[in-house]
Amino acid sequence: MHGAGIWISVLIVVLAVLWIRFYFSRTRRTLLRLRIDLDKTWAGIDALMKQRHDEIPKLLGTCRGYMPHDHEAFEPIIRARTDYLKARTMQEKSLADFAMAGALETIFKIAAGYPALKSNNNFIKLKKQNAELERSIEEQQEFFNELVNAYNHRIRSFPGSVVRRRGHLEPRVPIPNPEIGDEA
């Protein structure tokens, strides 16, 4: 009987070790999946922002012909596009794109004073494309920030904190929104 008790104890220890390994392995897979989702979501946001910035020369070309006395209004757009093209980090790109959104809003308000420009089919098309891209970017940024919060919460709490240290997983920074004071 005494030998059976030892085997039962050994079996319990082995099962406990296997369960712990499974639990930590599952946690690691979950964290890696979240990290991959973050990378994919950011790639989608970056592609949308690039698409918007690629449309800027067309928009400026259309507007310049109708707005000969408002060329200074184009400066913030040109500056934001230059900043975006120079940007290397997610934060730099996001802040440059946010500046672009504000500059475009200003141009569209100024354009309202030019009836010929407002009725130009190319301008209407570009304005509509910009609105669709802006909506998509905002939705994707919101989703990205939700993923960042979930990921960061998981790597800060047990067992994710242990997996984070062993797997060299770093917290992610949400996309800043200067409009509401996020200075990530």
Image (cartoon, grey):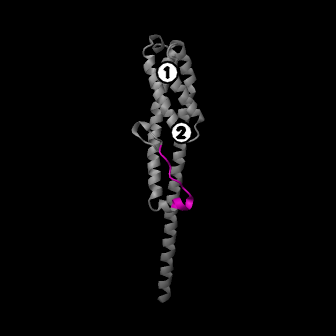
Image position, residue 88 (x, y; %): 59, 40
Kind of residue at badge 1: Ala
Discs 1, 2 touching: Cβ within 8 Å: no
Image position, residue 84 (x, y; %): 56, 33
The residue stretch that appears in magenta? 163-174
Q: Compare residues 162 and 15 and report the one nearer the observer.
A: 162
**Local crowd at mark 1 within 10 Å, few (<14), some, or many (≥20)?**
some
Q: Which mark is residue 152?
A: none
Q: Compare residues 56 and 45 and report the one nearer the observer.
A: 56
Q: Compare residues 19 and 175 and report the one nearer the observer.
A: 175
Q: Residue visible at 50% across and 77% down?
A: 11
Q: Residue visible at 55% across and 24% down?
A: 56
CA distance separating discs 1 and 2: 23 Å
Q: Which mark is residue 92?
A: 2
Tell which residue pokes out farthest to the bottom in this image.
2
Q: Is residue 50 above or below residue 38?
A: above
**Local crowd at mark 2 within 10 Å, few (<14), some, or many (≥20)?**
some
Image position, residue 24 (x, y; %): 50, 63
Residue 58, magenta (yes or no): no
Q: Is residue 3 above or below residue 46?
A: below
Tell which residue pokes out farthest to the left in this image.
180
Image position, residue 128 (x, y; %): 47, 23
Between marks 1 and 2 in the image, the one whose residue lies nearer the viewer: 1
Kind of residue at badge 2: Glu
Which residue is tagged 1? 73
Q: Is residue 80 above or below residue 158?
A: above
**Does label 1 or label 2 sit earlier along the sequence?**
1
Tell which residue pokes out farthest to the top in this image.
116
Q: Residue visible at 45% across and 15% down?
A: 118
Tell me the SS state at disc 1: helix
Tell me the SS state at disc 2: helix
Q: Is residue 70 above or below residue 34?
A: above
